[in-house]
Image (cartoon, rainbow, N blue to C red):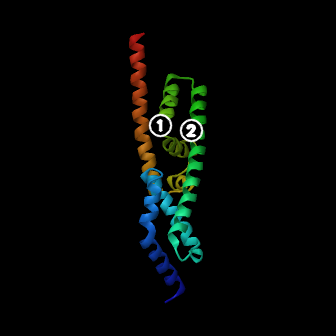
C-alpha cells in the first residue's frame, strides 16, 4: 500500500472513530452550523498534523475543537464590532429616508448576515472569494448571502411599515 493511501486510511479511521464525539463537544458549546465548522476545522488540523496524533486521540481532537471554538468566538467578536461600526456609519451618513431605513434594517440583522452582504455588495467580492474570506465553502457562502438578502428584505419591509405607521399617527 502506498504512503498516501495509508495516510488517507489512517485519517478516515480517525474520522470514523471520533467525528461524532468532536461534533457533540462543539454542539454543546455553540449553534449547530458553527459546531459543524468547528468539527471540520479540528479535523482539518488533524489531517495536517496526522503524524502528531497521540495513542489516545480523543482528548487531542477535543483540544483542537476547543481551539477552533476560541478562534471562532474571536472572529465573531470582531465581526460584531465591524457590523456595529458599519451600522453606525450608515446611520450617520444616511441622507434620505431610504438610506435611514437601510441603516435600521442592517442594524437589525445578525452579524453573519451583515458580513455576507458587505463582502458582496461593498467589497465587490465574488461568492468564491467571499467564501475564502469567511472560511467556508462557496456553496455555504451562497446560501448565507441568499438568506441574508431575504432577512434584509423582511427588515426593510418592517422598517417601511413602522415609518408608515408613524406618519399616519403624525
54 versus 156 height, above or below: below
Q: Position of residue 77 (x, y in %)?
A: 58, 44
Q: What residue lies at 52% left-to-right and 72% top-to-bottom?
A: 57
Indicate which disc residue 83 carries. Answer: 2
Q: Position of residue 153 (x, y in %)?
A: 41, 35
Res. 158 image quadrant: top left
Q: Position of residue 159 (x, y in %)?
A: 43, 26
Q: Position of residue 139 (x, y in %)?
A: 44, 56
> In this rendering, would 132 be left or right of 19?
right
How far separated are the C-alphas under marks 1 and 2? 9 Å
Q: Nearer the viewer, residue 43 or 168?
A: 43
Tell how many labels. Answer: 2
Q: Quadrant of the C terminus?
A: top left
Q: Residues within 10 Å of mark 1 (few under 14, many from 20)?
A: some
Q: What residue lies at 48% left-to-right and 27% top-to-bottom?
A: 101
1 and 2 marks in contact (CB < 8 Å): yes
Describe the element under mark 1 as helix, strand or loop. Answer: loop
Q: Residues within 10 Å of mark 2 (few under 14, many from 20)?
A: many
156 versus 170 height, above or below: below
Q: Is residue 145 visible?
A: yes
Write down the residue under mark 1. Answer: 109
Amino acid at each position: 500500500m502506498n504512503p498516501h493511501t495509508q495516510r488517507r486510511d489512517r485519517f478516515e479511521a480517525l474520522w470514523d472513530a471520533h467525528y461524532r464525539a468532536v461534533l457533540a463537544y462543539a454542539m454543546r458549546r455553540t449553534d449547530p452550523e458553527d459546531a459543524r465548522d468547528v468539527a471540520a476545522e479540528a479535523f482539518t488540523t488533524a489531517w495536517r498534523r496526522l503524524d502528531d496524533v497521540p495513542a489516545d486521540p480523543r482528548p487531542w481532537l477535543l483540544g483542537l475543537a476547543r481551539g477552533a471554538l476560541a478562534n471562532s468566538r474571536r472572529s465573531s467578536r470582531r465581526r460584531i464590532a465591524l457590523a456595529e461600526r458599519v451600522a453606525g456609519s450608515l446611520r450617520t451618513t444616511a441622507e434620505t429616508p431610504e438610506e435611514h431605513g437601510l441603516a435600521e434594517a442592517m442594524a437589525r440583522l445578525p452579524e453573519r448576515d451583515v458580513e455576507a452582504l458587505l463582502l458582496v455588495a461593498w467589497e465587490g467580492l465574488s461568492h468564491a472569494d467571499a467564501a475564502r474570506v469567511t472560511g467556508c465553502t462557496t456553496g455555504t457562502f451562497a446560501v448565507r448571502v441568499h438568506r441574508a438578502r431575504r432577512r434584509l428584505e423582511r427588515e426593510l419591509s418592517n422598517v417601511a411599515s413602522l415609518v408608515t405607521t408613524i406618519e399616519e399617527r403624525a
